[in-house]
Structures are given as C-alpha cells and as structure tokens.
Image (cartoon, rainbow, N blue to C red):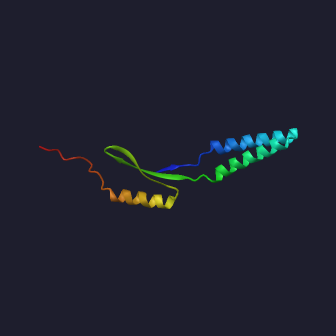
C-alpha cells in the first residue's frame, strides 16, 4: 500500500504570491491589487485544506504491477491490505529438485 501525501508546492506558491500582491497593493494604496492578493491567498489556503491524503494499493502479478484501488479512508485501506496479504498463500521457499 502506498500513501500519497498532500501536495504542498501549489498551495504554498499561491499563498506566497497572494501575500506579495496584497502587501504590494497595500503599500502602493491600490485597492484592486490588495483585493486580488487576498483572493489569491484565500485560494491557496483553500487548496491546502481541501486536499486529502490518498492511499493506493498495488498488486504484483506475472503481467506486472496493477493498481487495485484508491481511497481516502486509511482504516479501509489497512483492512483491505491485511485481507489481501492473508488471502495470498506464501510462496514456497524453493522448488524441490526433480530427478
């Protein structure tokens, strides 16, 4: 199972750009620039809080690696991973030599 964390660069970049535009608008006395900067900062904040951590499960088959499912629910992902691990029989350590 693979955990895909929140993506940080875009929300941080939006927040910083919005803050720079808002401060510049405030210093220059430009209402539209101040408003635009605040709006961009709010979009950055909202994009940060609405992101979820995603859990993905992959299974290796003879044909290659396959994605089984993607979910936001960690408990569900852990239960399914345990069921899959318990349901797949252990591979034999080595094949007996044939004579």
Camera-side residue of 22 and 16? 22
Residue lying at 82% horizontally and 43% vertically, measured from the top left: 32
**In the rendered image, the vertical position of residue 23 relative to residue 52, given as above or below:** above
Position of the C terminus by quadrant: top left
Q: Quadrant of residue 16?
A: top right
Camera-side residue of 48 and 37? 37
**In the rendered image, the vertical position of residue 42 relative to residue 76, given as above or below:** above
- Asked whether, in this view, residue 37 is left or right of residue 11, the answer is right
- Asked whether, in this view, residue 39 is left or right of residue 66, the answer is right
Residue 19, x across and y down, in percent: 76, 43
- Asked whether, in this view, residue 71 is left or right of residue 31, the answer is left
Residue 86, x across and y down, in percent: 35, 59
Residue 93, x across and y down, in percent: 27, 49
The residue furthest front is 32
Camera-side residue of 53 and 92? 53
Residue lying at 14% horizontally and 44% vertically, measured from the top left: 98
The residue furthest right is 29
The residue furthest left is 99
Residue lying at 72% horizontally and 49% vertically, measured from the top left: 42
Count the numbered circles shown.
0
Residue 82, x across and y down, in percent: 41, 59
Residue lying at 59% horizontally and 49% vertically, measured from the top left: 6
- Asked whether, in this view, residue 85 is left or right of residue 21, the answer is left
């Amino acid at each position: 199972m693979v955990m895909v964390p929140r993506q940080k660069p875009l929300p941080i970049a939006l927040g910083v750009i919005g803050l720079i535009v808002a401060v510049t608008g405030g210093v220059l006395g430009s209402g539209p620039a101040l408003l635009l900067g605040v709006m961009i900062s709010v979009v950055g904040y909202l994009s940060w809080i609405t992101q979820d951590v995603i859990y993905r499960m992959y299974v290796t088959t003879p044909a290659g690696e396959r994605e089984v499912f993607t979910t936001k629910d960690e408990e569900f992902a852990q239960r399914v991973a345990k069921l899959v691990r318990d349901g797949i029989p252990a591979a034999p350590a080595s094949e007996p030599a044939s004579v």
